[in-house]
Image (cartoon, helix red, strand yellow):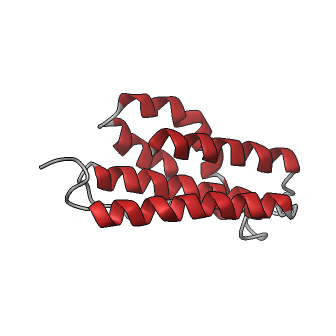
Amino acid sequence: MKKGTLYKKDVQEWTNRAKDDVRWAEYNYAGKFWPQTCFACQQAVEKIFKAYLLFQNQGIPRTHKLLSLLEKCVVFENRFKSWSKPASSLDKYYIRTRYPDVSPSEFSQEQAADALKIAKEITTFTM
């Protein structure tokens, strides 16, 4: 079976959602919504990793942890290892950006810009 044939429609849907999340992050960034920018970036990378796993005819793991998803991608493409540190930096935004009682810290424009840069680079690499 050729790569991507088992889940072809799903690969496209997950890829489209990842692209939408990057656009959502850009919109949030333009509006100076720093936590929301960071969260949307985490979501974009999570979805593009899941699209890649579907392309490899794998099921989607029920996790939001980018490093866990990344490890599964590395099995098929060793170059994914280079995204370990950037994915780790986005991983922390899944909870912290949404729940002030978990981490009441402020988010900066610099953090949001960095998250957006990482999300764009990883989604471009993966697509």
**Residue drawn at 70 percent across, 47 percent down:** 115
Residue 72 screen position, x and y as percent:
35, 44
In the visual, does 55 lie left or right of 49? left
**Residue drawn at 76 percent across, 63 percent down:** 27
Q: Nearer the viewer, residue 122 or 71?
A: 122
Q: Is residue 63 visible?
A: no
Q: Quadrant of residue 78?
A: top left
Residue 122 screen position, x and y as percent:
55, 42
Q: Is residue 26 visible?
A: yes
Residue farthest left in this picture: 1
Residue 23 screen position, x and y as percent:
66, 60
Q: Is residue 96 above or below residue 73?
A: below
**Residue drawn at 88 percent across, 61 percent down:** 32
Q: Quadrant of residue 13?
A: bottom left
**Residue drawn at 60 percent across, 40 percent down:** 121
In the visual, does 50 lie left or right of 118? left
In this rendering, the count of numbered labels is 0
Q: Nearer the viewer, residue 74 or 125?
A: 125
Residue 2 screen position, x and y as percent:
17, 47
